[in-house]
Image: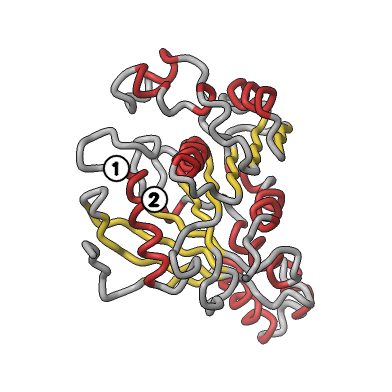
Amino acid sequence: MNERVSRRSVLVAGTAALGVAGLAAATAAGVTPLGEALRAVGVTAGSPQVGFTRVERVFSAARGRMVDLVFLLPSKYPPAGLPMSLMLHGLHGSARSAAPSGLVKQLATDVGRKAVPAHGYVAVDGGDNYWHEVRAGDDPMAMLLEEVPRWLAARNLAGPRGLPFACAGVSMGGFGAMVYGRRRVERRQPPEAVAAISPALITSWPEMAKRHIFTGQTDWTSLDPLRHLTALRGVPTALWCGTEDSFITGVRRYIAATHPAIGYTATGKHSDTFFHSVVPSMVGFVGKHVPRAG
């Protein structure tokens, strides 16, 4: 296996956990009642988990570089074989910034109260290339399809094959999630679900050309979900987008043409404020499609 894993893994407690620790200190000092402190960070009776994030560095042969591998988990010690979904970052993002705010906390809360089966997310650095090979030797889609399953299986996640059961993403990551779903279908390994928050569905080549990502119009149209409307037929798909988002026209076209399981639009811009507002819906949607044991 052509893989190098750094000896040091960076362990990062979930942000909610840090909030609890700080409020616990305030409670001990007599500043804040414990019940009020816990409610302030969204922890209530019956939801003891606050989520956990783990970051590692691994070598991607597909990308020809070291990348961050970020695990977004419902608890610090997940069960063996925990089902995992991909979480793809947007343009100028990274694995560490892939998840919209509140995702880990929402995941832990929903799993803790058994609203969804236990599952997690994994994010990885994909670069600013719309999750396809722009430059020879840097192929993030090959990394997702070939390397991520090996990395997950080696860590006893996502079952013996390490195959993510779903893919989610934000902005460029939403575009990537839809392309990833298509590639899985082509391999006769369709994912259980695809979730795209404000996916970067641009409706004209001149507008896309400004991003200097694709080698030409043909390169773009070969991947553009709006030109491959049947690619995810049979795969439960969900889209969310703000009506003040620059991608709303493309998202509306996709929703009207494909009638996805969720096609949600509401007031909001292309910002984490809107992304955060739909996290509960996204976690619920992805959680609904977690494969059952056996």
Check the picture and name the quadrant holding the C terminus: bottom right
Front residue of 290/209: it is 290
Q: CA distance from mark 1 to mark 2?
A: 9 Å
What residue is drawn where x is 40% and y is 60%? Answer: 149
Q: Position of residue 242 (x, y in %)?
A: 66, 32
Residue 139 bears which disc, if any?
A: 1
Q: Nearer the viewer, residue 96 or 264?
A: 264
Q: Is residue 211 visible?
A: yes
Identify the amino acid type marked 1.
Asp
Percent of width and height locating residue 24: 65, 80
> Of residues 219 and 72, which is closer to you in this image?
219
Provide residue 64's location: percent of width, then percent of height.
21, 50
Residue found 30% across the figure and 36% down from its top: 133
Q: Secondary structure at mark 2?
A: helix
Pointer 2 residue: 144
Say left or right for 241 vs 45: left
Q: Which residue shows up at 69% across the image and 23% down it?
A: 256
10 Å neighbourhood of mark 1: few (<14), some, or many (≥20)? many
Q: Quadrant of residue 96?
A: bottom left
- Nearer the N terminus, badge 1 or badge 2? 1
Crowd rating for badge 2 (residues with CA inside 10 Å; few <14, some 14–19, many 20+) = many
In the image, 53: left or right of 255?
left
